[in-house]
Amino acid sequence: MTLETLREYCLSLPYVSEDIKWGNDLCFCIGGKMFCITGLVQPIGASLKVPDEEFDELCSRNGIKPAAYLARYKWIYVEDLDNFSVKEWKHYLKQSYEMKREKLSPKLKKTFGIPL
């Protein structure tokens, strides 16, 4: 997967916005809550939230490790976009997106125009 393909897929999900934080990190958000973070300079990796039960298994794979500062919330860092197939990326990105969307408060959903 390329950065552009990842970006296109994230932005195809409903109510997603993108923002650059910390100078050169591209963040994809739902209701203001990040579900994917990627760099803009080579090498390009990405961080995303995974379910608790998948965290240890994914971190045991080559090229995937607990995300700095976010590991306690079960975020992983994929060191190279090629470490997942396109199918895997779509699965894990949508899963991260849905986990973040489910946790949004009704007030936040209303603020961002997200259906309850």
Image (cartoon, rainbow, N blue to C red):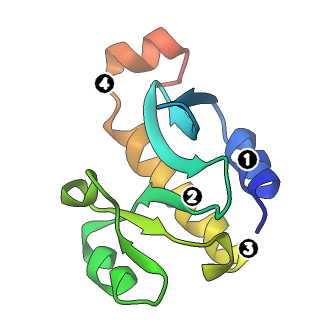
* Residue 76 shown left or right of residue 47 in the figure: left
Q: Name the residue type under label 3.
A: Val
The Cα atoms of the two marked residues, 3 and 1, are separated by: 12 Å
Q: Residue sitting at 57 percent across and 58 percent down?
A: 93
Please say if 97 is above or below 79.
above
Which mark sits nearer the N-terminus, 4 or 3? Answer: 3
Image location of residue 11, percent across then percent down = 72, 39
Residue 7: give its label.
Answer: 1
* Residue 108 shown left or right of residue 92 in the figure: left
In the structure shown, which secondary structural element does the residue marked by tag 3 occupy? helix
* Residue 96 shown left or right of residue 105 in the figure: right
Q: Nearer the viewer, residue 3 or 34?
A: 3
The Cα atoms of the two marked residues, 4 and 3, are separated by: 31 Å
Image location of residue 43, percent across then percent down = 64, 64
In the structure shown, which secondary structural element does the residue marked by tag 1 occupy? helix
Q: Which residue is mark 3?
A: 86
Mark whose residue sits in front, 1 or 4: 1
Image location of residue 85, percent across then percent down = 69, 80
The Cα atoms of the two marked residues, 2 and 4, are separated by: 21 Å
Q: Name the residue type under label 4.
A: Ser
Q: Which residue is mark 4?
A: 105
* Residue 8 shown left or right of residue 61 in the figure: right
Which mark sits nearer the N-terminus, 3 or 1? Answer: 1
Q: Residue sitting at 66 percent across and 64 percent down?
A: 90
Tell me the crowding category of disc 4: few under 14, some 14 to 19, or many 20 or more residues within 10 angstroms, Cα based: few
Q: Residue sitting at 59 percent across and 27 percent down?
A: 19
Please say if 12 is above or below 1.
above
Name the quadrant containing residue 51.
bottom left
Disc 4 vs disc 3: Cβ atoms closer than 8 Å? Answer: no
Q: Which residue is mark 2?
A: 93
Residue sticking out furthest to the top: 111
